Image (cartoon, helix red, strand yellow):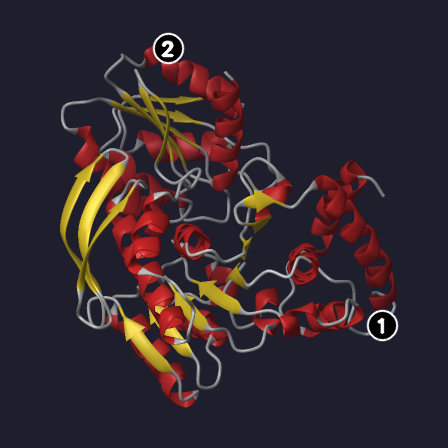
Amino acid sequence: MNYQQAIDYIHGIERFGSKPGLARTKELLKHLGSPEKSLKFVHVAGTNGKGSTSAFITGMLQEAGYRVGLYISPFLERFNERIQINRCEIPNNELAILVTQIKLICEEISKTPVGHPTQFEITTALALKYYAEQKVDIVVLEVGLGGRFDATNVIPAPEVAVITTIGFDHQAILGDTLAKIAYEKAGIIKKNSIVITGVKDNESLAVITKRVNEEEATLYAINKNFASKNREFKLQSQQFTYESLNSDLYDISISLNGIHQVDNACVAIAAVEVLQSKGYKISWQAITEGIKKVKWPGRMEVVAKKPTIILDGAHNTHGTKALAKSMRELKQNKRIITVIGILKDKDFAEMIEHIADLTDYAIITAPDYYRALNINVLAEEAKKLIKNVRAIVPVTKAIEQAKKIANEDDIILVTGSLYTIGEARSFLTKE
């Protein structure tokens, strides 16, 4: 199987959908020699902020000299982005070899009562096999959906578990209250483990604390055990003071935009402090330098100037609320032209509501993905709150129209889905 055949096979597996349970992943890994048993992990769950927090942790560990596996989802432009070592994507030939091997195993497993593994289960298994073969020092492993029944939850107890935030997303699968969603995320907490969380609301925190107590684990929470203060913000540069688990103060600088990224950075640093306590050789210089260097595509990412074009993957109500808060700092007297494409299983009305007062002109679009929301449905909703609305597909045409409307000092914001900004990024970075 060559690389393109491997990618076609993986995308073809999407027809099996998402099915709860860990049995298929365990069976698949057993056939692969149980690679997860030879690896160390930082396990990262949460509604939003998983990717940025994982990138921050990876950056600090890499700066300290460790060989770090990073597993994320979904991808923006290339499937290989999901499986990285020291921020280098898995090579095409390595991916093709592993997929060829896994395809044969899946054909065998599908004949048993366990059934055919899903796309995410296959991707998780091949990532773990790759990391074991490459002898990484540690893997920063991002949960795909929820936690309790997520394929990543087959791993042994991690060095540290992280729950970034809890908000409304995937309610049909995870539940329709914050407590139910928190219960699923807290499913990654294992016996005697250490947990870091950026969760602030009492309802979710109570659920996480209950699980921590049941598993005789230890919990460190933002604004209780670690915190930030004295934040200063300008585009592509934020400075703040980090108050550590030991109450020491450190000056931190990050290049990711958005108020929420300060919280993500604090959670990441706290997780690395836990690794320090476990004997990992990570100096505070490696922490401050490593986190400063982190770039993360599609998270309030500035891809052009005059006009300023910002790509942000906010894809649920929690994400758009955080995005709106950060965009208010940037708006001042500038016009914002918002290009937005959302998936149909999201609460699109509330997402529009969060960004409506910031948006001077909305261009409704849709990514080339079967779960995309119809542009006419979204446009009708947008017209209730935004004066100037147009609907244009594909995403590339929507961006071209935004650029025609924009003056040099305006801001074009592309958001609504990681699939939307993936298409936008491919188009804009090739121009």
Report which residue position mark 1 lands on. 112
Under circle 1, the secondary element is: loop
Pick the front one: 117 or 168 = 117
Does 428 appear above or below 405? below
Residues under labels 1 and 2: Cα distance?
57 Å
Q: Amino acid at mark 2?
A: Lys
In the drawing, does residue 157 fall left or right of residue 283? right
Report which residue position mark 2 lands on. 404
Residue 316 point in image, percent of width and height: 40, 49
Q: Which mark is residue 428?
A: none
Q: How many numbered discs sit on the rendered protein?
A: 2
Residue 224 point in image, percent of width and height: 20, 72
Is residue 27 visible in the rendered image? The answer is yes
Residue in the picture at 64% in, 72% down? 38
Residue in the picture at 38% in, 53% down? 49
**Where, by quadrant of the figure, is residue 123 drawn?**
bottom right
Does 408 appear above or below 411? above
Does 429 appear above or below 15? above
**Number of residues whose C-alpha sits closer than 10 Å to that of mark 2, classed few (under 14), some (14–19) or many (20 or more):** few
Residue in the picture at 29% in, 59% down? 284
Residue 39 point in image, percent of width and height: 60, 69
Q: Quadrant of the N terminus?
A: top right
Q: Amino acid at mark 1?
A: Thr
Pick the front one: 20 or 281 = 281
**Number of residues whose C-alpha sits closer than 10 Å to that of mark 1, classed few (under 14), some (14–19) or many (20 or more):** few
